[in-house]
Image: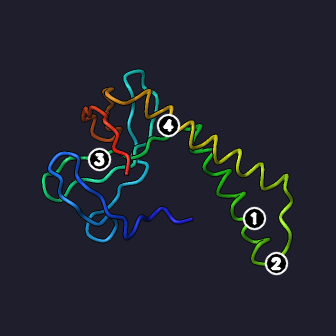
Amino acid sequence: MANDIKNVMASCKECGHRFQLGTTVPVKYQMSYRDKGGRSIFLTYYDCPQCGTTHYVQIDDTHTLELKKETVRMFARLSKKRMDFKAIPKKQNDKFVKTNNKLTVTRQELMKQYDGQIVFDADTGAEVELHFTIV
């Protein structure tokens, strides 16, 4: 499961410009930020090539990153079984679905929690007010 978004069309919420993500407009993955309490969060975003508006599309913390690792491992195991034409036990598939759903719900909760909040770039200390864009 690649981290690279290609051939996804996006539209800027500010200027309305439509553009393709990945090829000409890079997506920045899991960039490190800190909230006012010092908690690490990781943001995925892209910038509009026309007006420069930043579109935050995903947020992670250490818990969601662990959930993501777990789902990627499970996905790889299930995919290998499929490639080998082996049956996938219902229990394994259910666990994958449950963990993947938990990851999605937890990320959505983080988006609600942090939307409109001020966070700080971990490298530069620059202050950013978060507003999430759903692609």
**Which element carries disc 1, helix, strand or loop?**
helix
Q: Earlier in the sequence, mark 2 or mark 3?
A: 3
Alpha-carbon span between mark 3 and mark 4: 16 Å
Alpha-carbon span between mark 1 and mark 2: 11 Å
**Labelled pair 4, 2 in contact (Cβ < 8 Å):** no
Q: Earlier in the sequence, mark 1 or mark 2?
A: 1
Residue 73 in picture, x, y percent from top left: 69, 58
- The residue that appears at 43% across and 30% down in the rendered structure is 112
Look at label 1 and name its amino acid: Leu
**Which element carries disc 3, helix, strand or loop?**
strand
- The residue that appears at 32% across and 38% down in the rendered structure is 121
Q: Earlier in the sequence, mark 3 or mark 1?
A: 3
Q: Nearer the viewer, residue 131 or 4?
A: 131
**Which element carries disc 2, helix, strand or loop?**
loop
Q: Which residue is mark 2?
A: 85
For residue 108, the mark is 4
Residue 12 in picture, x, y percent from top left: 22, 52
Alpha-carbon span between mark 4 and mark 2: 35 Å
Q: Which residue is mark 3?
A: 55
Q: Which residue is mark 1?
A: 78
Q: Relative to residue 101, is residue 78 depicted above or below?
A: below
- Where residue 36 sits, quadrant-wise, is top left
Alpha-carbon span between mark 3 and mark 1: 33 Å
Look at label 2 and name its amino acid: Phe
**Labelled pair 1, 2 in contact (Cβ < 8 Å):** no
Q: Earlier in the sequence, mark 4 or mark 2?
A: 2
